[in-house]
């Protein structure tokens, strides 16, 4: 090892789901939306004047921030935007989690949280979920330096009630509580209204899932003006121009299209409910999902084998080679046609044994 390597910030990076280069793949591995984004986004893209590329974007991305604020009935000073919710959450970790006490999150959850905690040298404690993958609010009533979890949780898809979250927020006035609502539009109830009452609650959402815009990278946080001001101070101390002009224009147009959002989510929910029946018929067990994926455990055959055999058939799902979750596959809800192809492939694989 060279001497200078002693001074390198060493990291074990997050591993995103595979993005296959080949076409003709059925991609059910990264919780993308199989339907197109709002036509308003397409129109905004077509109207985009490339001469604008010469110019820096607005550092406060106000066009996008205002559109989000208007959509959710909050002030623009209560909205923070970033390059996907990954960027937003990373900023939130840097801004709010600076205590010697551990940040708390579930042991089975979004696998980026411990990566951010490690890179920012934040102590953390992973709280075991119950046997049926639920969060016990009592477990989050102990000294801590902050709390974060997704609702619905990932990769389980399990939704916690507004009451559960309210109890956790109410019991932790000395910490910032971040609820990562990446999948909330697929049937859950957002805790956004609670941000009016609790100035330590930050709600994070994304355009990547319900708004079919993962490729544009737009995430946002809504919270008290105080929280958002602190986040912006940190953001403007790292990189002022995170949101590019095309993204700002397309995002601002898309977020106002509630009809597209609702129709797309309704289709995915219908397909998901049908998928629950199809998978159960094939012996899979799973916690009840309120997201755009199902965390399913095959019977009598290792999840890894199913994963590999699906992959050979050009159907990509997600599998983690880790204890407990290694018994499961996370299957993103695709179109009805894609799901039919999945069921046919599963029938073949299960027959082969
Ligand atoms: N939170 C959770 C729980 C997720 O599953 C994801 C998607 N990987 C994200 C946040 C980040 O999504 P994005 O950066 O695309 O908004």
Image (cartoon, rainbow, N blue to C red):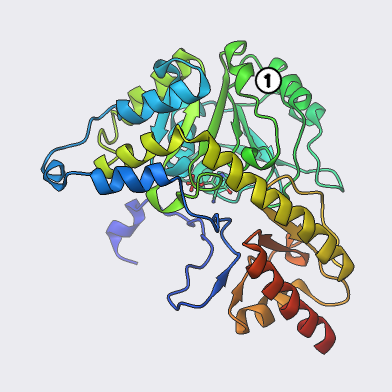
Residue 38 location, quadrant:
top left
Q: Is residue 89 left or right of residue 301?
A: left
**Residue found 30% across the figure and 30% down from its top:** 61
Q: Is residue 155 left or right of residue 223?
A: right
Q: Residue 223 appears at what percent x and percent y?
A: 52, 20
Q: In terms of depth relative to the viewer, which is nearer, 125 or 283?
A: 283
Total marks in image: 1
Q: Is residue 122 visible?
A: no
Q: Which residue is mark 1?
A: 169
**Residue found 62% across the figure and 62% down from its top:** 335
**Residue found 28% across the figure and 29% down from its top:** 237
Residue lying furthest bottom in this view? 352
- Determine if the C-beta at disc 1 is less than 8 A from ligand 1: no
Classify 251 as above or below 312: above
Q: Residue 15 appears at what percent x and percent y?
A: 52, 60
Classify 122 as above or below 352: above
Which quarter of the image is occupied by the C terminus? Answer: bottom right
Q: Residue 319 appears at what percent x and percent y?
A: 66, 66
Q: In terms of depth relative to the viewer, which is nearer, 147 or 348?
A: 348
Residue lying furthest top in this view? 197
Classify 32 as above or below 150: below
Q: Is residue 68 visible?
A: yes
Q: Residue 108 appears at what percent x and percent y?
A: 71, 49
Residue 204 location, quadrant:
top right
* SS at mark 1 in the image: helix
Q: Is residue 302 left or right of residue 14?
A: right
**Residue found 40% across the figure and 16% down from its top:** 77
Q: In terms of depth relative to the viewer, which is nearer, 4 or 332?
A: 332
Which quarter of the image is occupied by the N terminus? Answer: bottom left
Q: Is residue 212 left or right of residue 280?
A: left
């Amino acid at each position: 090892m060279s001497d200078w390597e002693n001074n390198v910030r060493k990291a074990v990076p997050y591993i995103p789901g595979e993005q296959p280069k080949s076409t003709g793949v059925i991609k059910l591995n990264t919780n993308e939306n199989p339907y197109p984004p709002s036509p308003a986004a397409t129109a905004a893209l077509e109207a985009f004047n490339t001469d604008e590329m010469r110019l820096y974007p607005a550092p406060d991305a106000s066009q996008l921030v205002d559109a989000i604020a208007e959509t959710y009935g909050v002030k623009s000073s209560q909205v923070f935007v970033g390059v996907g919710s990954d960027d937003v959450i990373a900023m939130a970790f840097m801004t709010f989690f600076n205590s010697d006490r551990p940040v708390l999150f579930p042991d089975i959850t979004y696998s980026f949280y411990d990566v951010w905690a490690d890179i920012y040298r934040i102590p953390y404690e992973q709280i075991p979920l119950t046997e049926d993958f639920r969060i016990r609010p009592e477990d989050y009533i102990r000294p801590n330096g902050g709390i974060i979890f997704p609702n619905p949780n990932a990769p389980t898809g399990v939704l916690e009630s507004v009451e559960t979250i309210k109890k956790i927020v109410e019991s932790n006035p000395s910490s910032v509580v971040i609820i990562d609502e990446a999948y909330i539009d697929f049937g859950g109830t957002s805790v956004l209204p609670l941000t009016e009452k609790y100035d330590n609650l930050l709600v994070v959402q994304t355009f990547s899932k319900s708004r079919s815009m993962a490729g544009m990278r737009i995430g946002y946080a809504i919270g008290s003006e105080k929280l958002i001001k602190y986040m912006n101070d940190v953001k403007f101390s790292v990189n002022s121009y995170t949101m590019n002009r095309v993204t700002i224009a397309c995002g601002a147009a898309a977020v106002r299209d509630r009809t597209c959002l609702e129709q797309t989510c309704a289709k995915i929910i219908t397909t998901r409910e049908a998928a629950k029946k199809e998978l159960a018929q094939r012996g899979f067990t799973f916690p009840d999902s309120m997201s755009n994926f199902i965390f399913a455990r095959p019977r009598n055959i290792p999840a890894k084998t199913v994963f590999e055999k699906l992959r050979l058939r050009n159907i990509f799902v997600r599998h983690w080679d880790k204890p407990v979750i290694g018994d499961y596959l996370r299957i993103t809800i695709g179109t009805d046609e894609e799901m039919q192809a999945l069921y046919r492939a599963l029938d073949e694989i299960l027959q082969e044994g």
